[in-house]
Image (cartoon, rainbow, N blue to C red):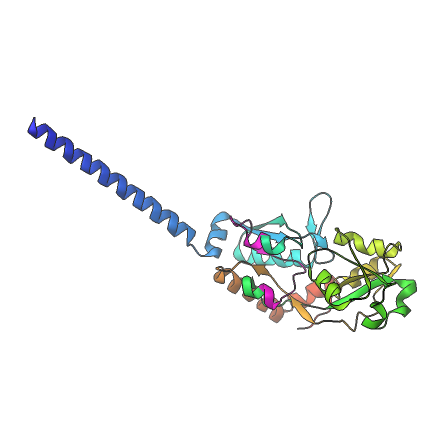
């Protein structure tokens, strides 16, 4: 009887030890997987997940059939091609952009489009080197182009200024246009037509966006295009802890600058090349 008890206890110890060892190995494997470099995980997945607003011609626009096109879209495709993977676009918005980047669980690898590099964004997230110069300007009706020659001409109570919510356009308008009538309109891509139809006097936008609308709608003008109110750059946005992905993105941007492909992409979309 004593012998059988000893054998049973030995077997139990072995089972417990084996279970603990298996659990420890599984935990180690899961931890190792979570700590894999970002690029390695993306390559293993076979596709780069890219967030974009899809409402910012000609940088990022989503057609009704779900297809995306634009300068930023092509940049994302080049980054994915450099990694040897496909690309899948994930919808985001200007009001939710930061929250979407920082969300748990992580929903995408990086965000791209008309995203301005700012110190505030760099404090809580990672931003790539700039690949497109930008600055705040206005889009107004062609017949009114002569009225607006400075910020003072705009900052008047009778001037209705339309902006999209949650982004730097709204921030700029709230901070710099303290007398003008600010109108917030949810769909950024529809604001130029709102201005053209007289539902607002102008739109605060970027020098990257305004030329496309002027070229495609004769009712509109951008009289201050060569005199932007601000100067900055657009880059790729991602969460912290992805230093290897940031290095790869910066390497792609540097290569495109040196081999001329970035300039050609600017020319394709009618954008000013500043590098």
Q: Position of residue 152 (x, y in %)?
A: 83, 72
Q: Position of residue 209 (x, y in %)?
A: 75, 61
Camera-side residue: 70 or 128?
Answer: 128
Camera-side residue: 232 or 167?
Answer: 167
Camera-side residue: 23 or 123?
Answer: 123
Q: Where is the C terminus found, in terms of image quarters? A: bottom right
Does residue 116 show up magenta in the picture?
yes
Please report the residue visible at 83 percent of the width from the left and 66 percent of the height from the top: 222
Camera-side residue: 53 or 80?
Answer: 53
User: Taken as a whole, is the magenta stretch helix, strand or loop?
Assistant: loop
Please report the residue visible at 71 percent of the width from the left and 43 percent of the height from the top: 65
* Location of residue 154 (image quadrant): bottom right
- Where is 88 relative to 7, above or below? below
Outermost residue to the left: 2
Q: Specify start and end residues of the magenta stretch as a single range.
A: 100-121
Please report the residue visible at 59 percent of the width from the left and 60 percent of the height from the top: 237
């Amino acid at each position: 009887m004593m012998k059988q008890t000893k054998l049973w206890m030995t077997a139990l110890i072995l089972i417990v030890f084996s279970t603990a060892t298996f659990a420890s190995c599984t935990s180690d494997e899961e931890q190792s997987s979570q700590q894999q470099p970002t690029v390695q995980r993306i390559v293993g997945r076979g596709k780069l997940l890219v967030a974009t607003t899809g409402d910012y011609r000609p940088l990022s626009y989503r057609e009704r059939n779900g297809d995306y096109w634009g300068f930023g879209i092509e940049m994302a495709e080049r980054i994915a091609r450099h990694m040897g993977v496909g690309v899948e676009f994930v919808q985001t918005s200007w009001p939710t952009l930061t929250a979407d980047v920082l969300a748990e669980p992580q929903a995408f690898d990086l965000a791209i489009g008309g995203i301005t590099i700012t110190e505030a964004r760099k404090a809580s997230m990672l931003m790539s080197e700039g690949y497109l110069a930008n600055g705040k300007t206005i889009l107004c009706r062609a017949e009114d182009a002569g009225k607006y020659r400075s910020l003072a001409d705009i900052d008047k109570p009778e001037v209705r200024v339309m902006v999209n919510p949650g982004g730097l356009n709204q921030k700029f308008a709230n901070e710099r246009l303290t007398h003008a009538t600010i109108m917030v309109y949810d769909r950024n891509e529809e604001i130029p037509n709102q201005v053209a139809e007289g539902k607002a006097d102008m739109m605060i936008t970027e020098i990257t966006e305004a030329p496309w609308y002027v070229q495609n709608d004769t009712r509109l003008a951008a009289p201050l295009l060569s005199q932007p109110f601000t100067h900055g750059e657009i880059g790729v946005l991602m969460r912290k802890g992805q230093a290897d992905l940031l290095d790869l993105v910066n390497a792609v941007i540097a290569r495109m600058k040196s081999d001329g492909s970035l300039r050609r992409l600017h020319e394709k979309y009618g954008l000013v090349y500043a590098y």
